Image (spheres, rainbow, N blue to C red):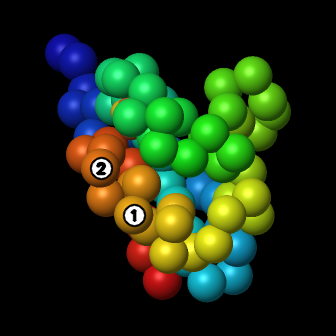
Amino acid sequence: MTSDPRNHPGKEYTNGEVTVMWKPALCDHSALCIMGLPKVFDPGQRPWIDIHAASTDDIIRVVDTCQELLYYF
Ligand code: SF4
């Protein structure tokens, strides 16, 4: 029996205003986030999401383009 990847744990990154959750099991590596905000989403860095590298509004704009990145306030 395989478990639903939507239930897999995610990693959270917060700047105190917004928290972005990334679930590795759901990421399709389409790179929409990397193209949209390369200062924040950089797979060459660890952690690969630098939540402090852009404004909250810009982060939300890019996260909205991805069906697998979630955010909450
Ligand atoms: S846009 Fe979403 S699904 Fe695509 S690489 Fe980024 S986090 Fe993964």
Where residue 25 appears, as percent x and y from the top left, is: 40, 27
The kind of secondary structure element at disc 1 is helix
CA gap, disc 1 and disc 2: 7 Å
Residue for point 75% across, 22% down: 44
* Residue 49 seen anywhere in this rendered image of the structure: no
Q: Residues within 10 Å of mark 2 (few under 14, many from 20)?
A: few
Q: Residue furthest top?
A: 1
Is 17 placed left or right of 30 in the picture? right
Residue for point 70% across, 45% down: 39
Tag 1–tag 2 contact (CB < 8 Å) = yes
Residue for badge 2: 65
Where residue 29 appears, as percent x and y from the top left, is: 41, 21
Residue for point 60% across, 56% down: 12
Quadrant position of the N terminus in the picture: top left
Instruction: Tally the numbered discs.
Output: 2
Ligand 1: quadrant of the figure:
top left
The kind of secondary structure element at disc 2 is loop
* Residue 14 seen anywhere in this rendered image of the structure: yes
Residue for point 49% across, 55% down: 21
Identify the disc placed on residue 9: none
Is 13 placed left or right of 28 in the picture? right
Where residue 45 appears, as percent x and y from the top left, is: 79, 30
Q: Does the residue labelled 2 lie within 8 Å of ligand 1?
A: yes
Where residue 30 appears, as percent x and y from the top left, is: 36, 23
- Residue type at tag 1: Arg
Residue for badge 1: 61
**Which of the 4 image quarters holds residue 61?**
bottom left
Q: Residue furthest right?
A: 46
Query: Against 69, is 54 above or below?
Result: below
**Which of the 4 image quarters holds residue 27?**
top left
- Residue type at tag 2: Thr
